[in-house]
Amino acid sequence: MRVPVIAGNWKMYLTPEEGRDMVVALGPLLAACRGREIVVCPPFTALATVATGLVGSNVRLGAQNMHAAPEGAFTGEIAAGMLKALGCAYVILGHSERRQHFCETDAMVAEKTRAALAADLIPIICVGETLIQRENGITQPVVEIQVRGALTGLPPEQLRRVIIAYEPVWAIGTGRTASATDAQNGCAFIRSVVRALDTGAADLVRILYGGSVKPENVQELMNGTDIDGALVGGASLKADSFARIVRYEEQ
Ligand code: 13P
């Protein structure tokens, strides 16, 4: 039985105060919510204030990126241990915006995945095809290379802890959600790739869908048998809409 995960990726939005206010408003809306992991991933600058706003809540903290080294002369970067010290339990890795704008490669995502797990952070590894790749019919090979690139060689006990987010690039921030069938097929394919790496891990690894998830479409997406949750961008910035997504079965 895989516990569903609903994670909010705030991207480069919300100041420290706005972030804290958001989670203070979110807490009571989700206080009675059981049976899922709820995560918010603010920008680095808001992690500390959001952590104070989350005290006593069932919502957990994640970051949006990290460097693979434990420390060092890497101006502008943040290490896994620093995130852990601020109360993070999760970290998003390899988001398509990082691959596209900051030249992140599968090799970098693999290195960060290992460093995150070594620091006891749960990596949320993002994969997904661009519109051109989809139109050229190469979605599956692209996604397979990304999944294998991040996970190959991980010891079985570590592989089981990772979360994978299938985020078709063309569905991110566009309002163009993948159909429930496409989302399910994408997540099922990812599970088959994990199965080829480690049979036992395939039924344990949580696979999320991301890309224009909203209160109106989350329930249909969550019906997919291989969809174990959602990675939500824009609709995670407001307490009310994020809470409605987390409580998807009440829609
Ligand atoms: P949107 O929900 O705004 O499309 O963003 C998805 C995303 O990139 C989450 O990581």
Image (tube, grey):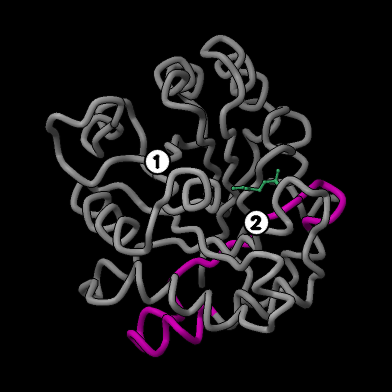
Left or right: residue 88 versus residue 1 is left
Q: Nearer the viewer, residue 208 or 219?
A: 208
Q: Residue 210 carries which label?
A: 2
Q: Which amino acid does label 2 sit on?
A: Gly
Which badge, 1 or 2, comes first in the chain's sequence? 1
Q: Which of 232 and 220 is in front in this view?
A: 232
Residue 90: quarter of image: top left
- Counting from the top left corner in percent of width and height, residue 171 is at 73, 57
- Counting from the top left corner in percent of width and height, residue 35 is at 57, 54
Look at mark 1 in the image and give the residue it sits on: 65
Q: Which of 51 and 146 is in front in this view?
A: 146
- For label 1, the SS is loop
Residue at 20% over, 73% down? 155
Q: Which amino acid does label 1 sit on?
A: Asn
Binning the other alpha carbons within 10 Å of mark 2 as few (below 14), some (14 to 19) or many (20 upward) gives many
The residue range painted magenta reads 190-218
